[in-house]
Amino acid sequence: MISRDETLAMVGLAIHLANVDLDLDTQEKRLLHFICRKIELTNEEIEKIKKQAISLSNLVDTVQSPDSRQLLVSLLALMAVTDHVLQDNEVSFIQKILQYFEMSPTDSPYLDEQGKPIEEALLRDRGQILMDIIGHHVDPDEAPEG
């Protein structure tokens, strides 16, 4: 089971990834809003994420369990392909997260050997990834399309 703090940290890191190319795309916004709405993010939690986001290492360190780390990598990969434009700095951020966790790209079914997200697999499984983050069933028709 993923803790609430881990979920909040994942959201904060997803927000960072979405902004890393200095262009928050409409699809990225829709995905972030969907997640925040479904996890019923409170104003207090939004402030907590903002405070923790000052230091990315604080957010990353909050994600402790192997399952949570795997899910974080999946979420970041999904966020990176959601706008159908994979930016080098998005890939670089994912690779840094992998390094920090001492994970290999091949530990994730959603990354190739170089750590680049595999768009087809991510879009196919986005409902399951979102369900794992949100903690309950996500109707595939309700999940924002990438």
Image (cartoon, helix red, strand yellow):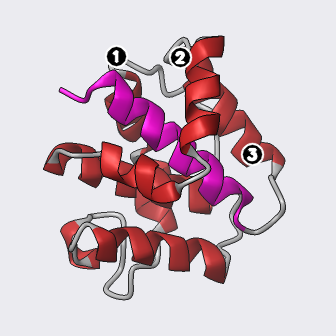
Label 3 vs 1, first from the N-terminus: 3
- Magenta residues? 1-20
Amino acid type at mark 1: His
Q: Position of residue 26 (x, y in %)?
A: 82, 45
| Location of residue 44 with respect to 99 vertically, above or below | above
Residue 10 part of the magenta segment: yes
Q: Position of residue 73 (x, y in %)?
A: 37, 58
Distance Cα–Cα, label 3 vs label 2: 16 Å
Quarter that holds the N terminus: top left
- Specify the quadrant of the image occupied by residue 49: top right
Question: Which residue is denoted by mark 3 in the rendering?
Answer: 27
Pointer 3 and pointer 2: residues touching (CB < 8 Å)?
no
Task: Tell which residue pokes out farthest to the bottom in this image.
Answer: 114
The structure residue drawn at horizontal position 22% and vertical position 78%, both measured from the top left corner, is: 104
Q: Residues within 10 Å of mark 2 (few under 14, many from 20)?
A: some
Q: Nearer the viewer, residue 103 or 78?
A: 103
Amino acid type at mark 3: Gln
Q: Position of residue 106 (x, y in %)?
A: 22, 76
Pointer 2 and pointer 1: residues touching (CB < 8 Å)?
yes
Question: Which residue is denoted by mark 1 in the rendering?
Answer: 136
Residue 38 - label: 2
- Specify the quadrant of the image occupied by residue 108: bottom left
Q: Nearer the viewer, residue 124 or 64?
A: 64
Front label number (3 vs 2) = 2
Q: Nearer the viewer, residue 61 or 94?
A: 61
Distance Cα–Cα, label 2 vs label 1: 9 Å
Q: Which SS class for mark 3?
A: helix
